[in-house]
Amino acid sequence: MSTEETKGKILEAAIDEFSEFGYQKATIRNISNRAKVNLAAINYHFSSKKELYRNVLEAVFSGDGNETKMPSGDNIDSREKLEAILHDWIEIFMSRLIGSPAEEEQRKYRICVHEMLFPSDIFDEVANKYIRRDIELLMGIISSGMPENTERARILIKTFSVLGQCLFYPFHRQLIKNFTRKDIFARENLEMIVNEIAGETLAGLNYVS
């Protein structure tokens, strides 16, 4: 097995381990067993558990370069265009969380959950690199739907209100399923969820053409 193949096996095993147990509870020994390599190989390719986790976060959040790009708030000149672009942003964001059955997306989702509950000191670094840009695009869209003199604090509150609604559905999915006995937040209801969030958001915006 080549050096790169070994490194790839370790990284794949680490993604599984961290997505299942989170950063705090994952162990290098378990990763070694999953990858079927010795501890020395892990130490050779990744100098520490922290460095390995940084590589895991980079791998799951950087994507393959084929992800649909988020829309921006540039050139919004009508309420109809604002509505369409806001809907597109929410739909793309939500589809990344609950719209794909791919195992890769599920592992990414589980790592996000662990980080929200027990944040590591590495996540901010990666979030700023890969998530911040999407949030800034959403801020631009929200800003386009509010008067020019709207204070930044109001734009931020509205932006994170949208994010909070988006994250609520997948992160509390099991709790709601236990309560309702139905998986109403499954992929087939994605459009309904998107319309609900977009509709509530638009109702709270005071668009001025």
Image (cartoon, grey):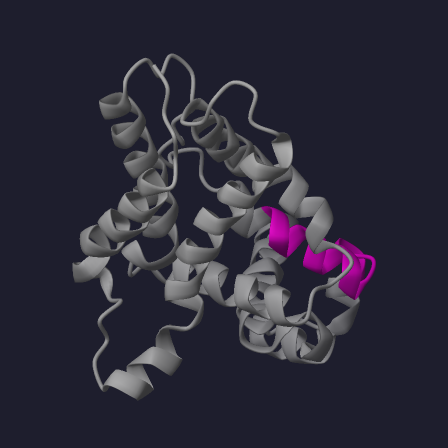
Residue drawn 60% across the image and 59% down it? 11
Q: Is residue 13 above or below residue 154?
A: below
Residue drawn 59% across the image and 70% down it? 114
Q: Quadrant of the C terminus?
A: top left
Does residue 159 appear left or right of residue 31 in this picture?
left
Query: What span is colored magenta in the figure?
Result: 43-58
Q: Is residue 32 above or below residue 83?
A: below
Q: Give x and y (percent) for residue 161.
A: 48, 50
State yes or no: residue 108 in magenta.
no
> Which is more toward the observer, 96 or 207?
207
Does residue 64 appear left or right of residue 99 in this picture?
right
Q: Quadrant of the N terminus?
A: bottom right
Tell me if residue 92 can be seen: no
> Which is more toward the observer, 5 or 27?
27
In this view, which residue lies farthest toward the right? 47
Q: Residue 154 falls in which quadrant of the image?
A: top right
Q: Give x and y (percent) for residue 32.
A: 66, 74
Q: How many marks?
A: 0
State yes or no: residue 44 in magenta.
yes
Residue drawn 57% across the image and 53% down it? 5
